Image (cartoon, helix red, strand yellow):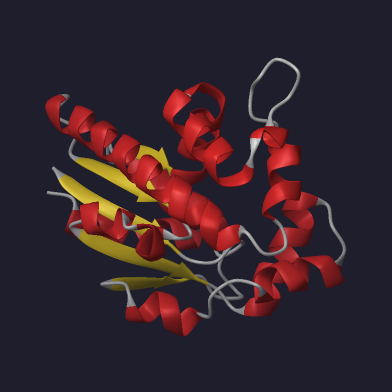
Amino acid sequence: MKVIGITGPTGAGKTTALNALRSLGAVVLDGDAVYHELLESSTEMKKALTGAFGRDILDREGKIDRRLLAEAVYPDGLERLNQVTHPLIVAEIAQRVEKARREGRPAAAIDAIALVESGLGELCDVIVAVLAPLDLRVKRIMARDGIDEAYARRRALAQKPDAFFRAHSDYALENVENDTPETFGERALELFRILVP
């Protein structure tokens, strides 16, 4: 089974690339979704986060309140949050990769913006960066999230530059201005047909 890491900035087209992988029978493991699941259900995550940020991040039922956690983390605690959560996310995704292997899946795709920084990249046989020009990404973020251009641009510029993703990837899938989801999806499928045996 091939483990493929998918990374790149928001609005670049990772969802389209992941859908191409799904069509080849790959299981998709979303780093953000796993993080949110662990916030809800993992006693280990809860213990680690309350140890780092205090019990004020809990709601009345004693569960982690994402809004309260965000207030505790920002603006200066993001690195600390990552140090606490990344090892737990990596361990959970590693278990899910092994489950996919046992199920006989042809591939597992790990989707994470912080694929390299979190350590998830070490689980991958190959890493593919999905990239797109900044202005195109801003337009997509605005349409997807219903936000204004200034906010969308700030979010896009807060992420690592394309050069970072290129330097830490084996392949780059370029989503260009005249691409449609269909044409980009076809190009992604061509690459993944080569990578997935």
Q: Nearer the viewer, residue 51 or 72?
A: 51
Position of residue 80 relative to residue 3, above or below, is: below
Q: Please indicate, yes or no, whether residue 27 appears anywhere in the rendered image.
A: no
Residue at x 55% of width, y 35% of height: 36
**Quadrant of residue 166 within the rendered picture:** bottom left
Q: Please indicate, yes or no, whether residue 96 appears anywhere in the rendered image.
A: yes
| Quadrant for the N terminus in the image | top left
**Quadrant of residue 78 within the rendered picture:** bottom right
Residue located farthest toward the top when viewing the structure as drawn = 61
Q: Nearer the viewer, residue 28 or 140?
A: 28
Where residue 195 appears, x then y in whole percent?
19, 57
Residue at x 84% of width, y 57% of height: 147
Position of residue 6 relative to residue 46, above or below, is: below
Instruction: Say whether residue 14 is left or right of residue 59.
Output: left
Instruction: Say whether residue 157 is left or right of residue 176.
Output: right
Residue at x 33% of width, y 64% of height: 128
Instruction: Say whether residue 64 is left or right of residue 191.
Output: right
Q: Nearer the viewer, residue 196 or 4?
A: 4
Q: How many marks?
A: 0
Where residue 95 appears, x then y in whole percent?
25, 33
Where residue 155 appears, x then y in whole percent?
71, 67
Residue at x 53% of width, y 40% of height: 51
Instruction: Say whether residue 178 is left or right of residue 56.
Output: left
Residue located farthest toward the bottom when viewing the structure as drawn = 163
